[in-house]
Image (tube, helix red, strand yellow):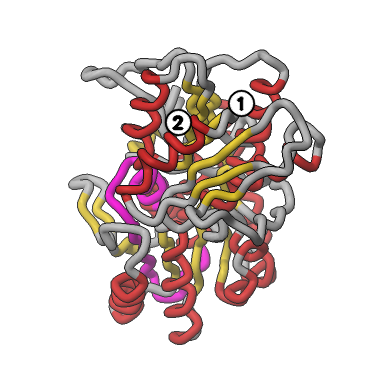
Amino acid sequence: MNKRFRLAAAVSAVALAVAACGEAPDEEGGDGTATGDGGGDFTACMVSDQGGINDKSFNETSYNGLVLAQEEGIIPEPKFAESQSDADYGPNVDAMVQDDCGLIVTVGFLLADATREAAEANPEEQFAIVDFQYVDETGAPAPIDNVKPLVFNTHEAAFLAGYASASYSKTGIVGTWGGAKIPTVTIFMDGFYDGVQYHNEQKGTQVQVLGWDKATQEGQFVGDFANTGLARQISDNLISQGADVLHPVAGPLAESAAIAAQAAGDVAVVWADSDGFESAPDYGDVILTSVLKGMDQAVLAATQEAADDAFTNEPFVGTLENGGVGIAPFHDFDAEISQETKDELAQIQEQIISGELVVESDAAFS
């Protein structure tokens, strides 16, 4: 009999091979755009969301896909434009169009409108957008001919992270909060929430989740991905209420939660998007695990496809089954997670992949 959990969005996988992070270019043009070395006919470009390509999270992981493409000889040095605010999205995308890019990768839900406008105005140009799929008024997919969505069912992986967090918690209280209240953020929070509830059901525990109410879809949000002061305040407040695990879903603002955890002591953090132990080593001592999105591999594959003149607008959907999402190793916390819990996580992952355990989300992609 299928076990069914209602999630509003998230992702997971116990084992995901994640490519090593490449270094971003050191030099930029005055407008924030770095130029490639012109070493090939086909070029690829990226427009970041706020936080830039060194955010230790989704922008950087996505950019690493272009770095990998360069290392494999598919493209010369990639070009990029960093967005500092919403006002930069349209101009940055337009600048990449004018730069004769073979593929323009835009990163994040907030770039959806700018990407659509540029794609419709330039039907000969090829785009890929990370973390967004266009839909119509009924919620059905509404593909754009020259835009390839790169999306991830992160509720599967966040479910595993929530289960692991509930098993680890000493206080019986965990917390989560987000940057902006958008589907690609709340999907993590929903999956995390339901993973905790599943642990409670299976193990007879009563671990509470602060910062997010899945039923009402209300919770704690900064409102953007830049306000480090408010991010720290939210983290401190959750810790003061007893949370000894925090799951921030806020790109670069996750550092604020890690700093709060280090200051408090005995508080762990579940990172999002990349393996925080590797991408943010200054905070490795408090990172329990990370919910991974294989954005680098998805960007690499899309770039190869476009370079081979085989571009399609068919979405890439990352799942536990195809390795597009997962959770990172426990690293410094490995000895504190019992073998029993590790075995349970492996079993849960297999049940999700097989369909025996069905995790659902209003923001899931198909």
**Residue density around tag 2, few if under 14, some if 14–19, many if 20 or more, within 10 Å:** some
Write the start and end of the magenta stretch as one range.
167-192
Q: Position of residue 18 (x, y in %)?
A: 69, 47
Judging by the rendered image, the residue that carries numbered circle 2 is 358
* Identity of the residue drawn at 41% across and 61% down: 248
Q: Position of residue 104 (x, y in %)?
A: 54, 32
* Identity of the residue drawn at 31% across and 49% down: 86
Looking at the picture, does residue 354 appear above or below residue 168? above
CA gap between label 1 and label 2 equals 39 Å
Q: Amino acid at mark 2?
A: Val
* Identity of the residue drawn at 59% across and 62% down: 276
Q: Amino acid at mark 1?
A: Gly
Judging by the rendered image, the residue that carries numbered circle 1 is 102
The first of marks 1 and 2 along the sequence is 1
Residue situated in front as seen by the camera: 176 or 344: 176
Q: Secondary structure at mark 2?
A: strand
> Can residue 152 be seen here?
no
